[in-house]
Amino acid sequence: MKKKVGLFYKKNGSFNNAVITIDKGIIRALDISKDDNEIIFTMGNGEILLKKGKSQDEKEIKDIHGDVTEYIKNTTINFSKVYKDKDYYVAKLNIPFSIVDTFKITKDNNEVNITTGDGWVKIDRKERIGKVYTLKVNKGGIGKTFLTVQLAHGLAMQGKRVMVLTSDSQNNIIDFTFPEEKQEAIELKKGLRSWVMTGKGDKIKLRKNLDFIPLESSLFTPKFLERLPVFIEHLKRDYDYVLIDSIPTMKIDTEFVKCSDKIIIPAFCDIPTLKGVINVIEEAGINKIKGIIINLYRNTVTQKEIMLKLKNILDQTDVVFPKPIKETSIIETLVKKGKTVWESRAKAVLDAQNSLLDIILEM
Ligand SMILES: Nc1ncnc2c1ncn2[C@@H]1O[C@H](COP(=O)(O)OP(=O)(O)OP(=O)(O)O)[C@@H](O)[C@H]1O
Ligand SMILES: [Mg+2]
């Protein structure tokens, strides 16, 4: 999320103070309230980190140019009443002048990136250039949507901002992230087409740090295809990752692949799928393949043989090839409930989590 730092000056033109508004998301992440508002404000590596509590030592170290290199101070989030007689508060945080200066924040250039996690809030000025991954295989029902959701949520849980897009107007992503009774209330009207053509639309918050833009229809005008890359570039400045759940028969898929840094191929251990996998590798070039994940694996003689064949082909390459994800009833049940594998503590899910992490850590 981007936020603006408000800069205030005195009548004589000298700097008075700099503030950012603290929204509900930040308050929740820090677990603070009006009466419990002490935080530790640290800076280092060009990042501000906020945490609840009080630090024993406070310090501020500057380099010879006056830029702050290390900063630890105890401070508070200020809650102030908007109306005298109403219990309605706004929360604000003061940013010290030395840090405003170090961050080169000015009236015309005052945006910062905010990332929230469990118990912390990060503020930085780094230009975000997100990476784009398409999940693609020329075969249905292998787990493209399933794996898109699991990888996306895994990245989001590491504090990354993740956007999921799809070229499938069935928007199955919703089925994998919400229980059935909650799905109906979700607005799917203004999706990717609207965003690309008008710059506005709906974003569905799947989880913390994880958004989804649905696809409202599978009819695309040449104008849409032409403008799609511009929109994806725009997303890359706001998200660390854009993951695309594709259906390979569509024209839009070619565009998505063009916009992608890398492709991740879901695979199944039968001959037709193996051929499909090789097909994608040949089409895109081996250098564009980030990883191949075997899904719905059963430990049969045939499947093992095909798995080893694939392993052999990939041995001399940089393609990540984790242990196959097994077909299990526990995953099936999780999916049915609209939960991800990261929301289960079952031992049987651990293997799948590990395989996904193998890829996530390389993404
Ligand atoms: N490891 C697994 N164990 C059990 N069931 C799984 C597993 N992975 C996927 N599934 C189930 O398999 C089905 C197909 O998965 P998914 O919908 O992700 O495939 P897809 O490639 O996106 O299909 P489509 O081509 O129709 O878009 C889903 O119903 C999902 O719940
Ligand atoms: Mg799908």
Image (cartoon, grey):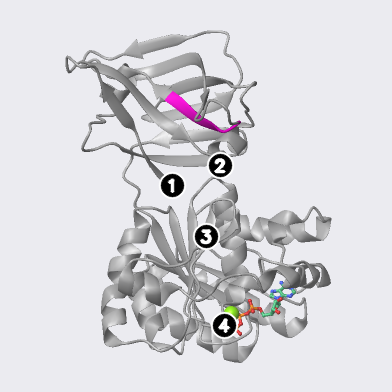
- The amino acid at mark 2 is Gly
Q: Is residue 233 left or right of residue 49?
A: left
Is disc 1 surrounded by few (<14), some (14 to 19) or many (20+) residues within 10 Å?
A: few
Q: CA distance from mark 4 to mark 3?
A: 17 Å
What residue is drawn where x is 37% and y is 68%? 260
The span shown in magenta is: 87-93
Amino acid type at mark 3: Asp
Between 90 and 336, the residue placed more toward the observer is 90
Identify the mark nearer the N-term, 1 or 4: 1
Residue 229 point in image, percent of width and height: 30, 70
Using residue 142 as the reference point, say whether residue 335 is left or right of it.
right
Local crowd size for mark 2, using a 10 Å CA cut-off: few (<14), some (14–19), many (≥20): some
Q: Earlier in the sequence, mark 2 or mark 3?
A: 2
Within 8 Å: ligand 2 and the Cβ of disc 4? yes
Identify the mark nearer the N-term, 4 or 3: 4
Residue 200 in which image quadrant:
bottom left
> Residue 133, located in which quarter of the rendered image?
bottom left
Res. 106 mark: none
- Which percent across, then down, holds residue 246? 49, 78
Q: Which residue is mark 2?
A: 25
The answer, for residue 68, to whether it is visible in the render is no
Q: Say which amino acid is labelled 4.
A: Gln
- Give the labeled residue for mark 3: 211
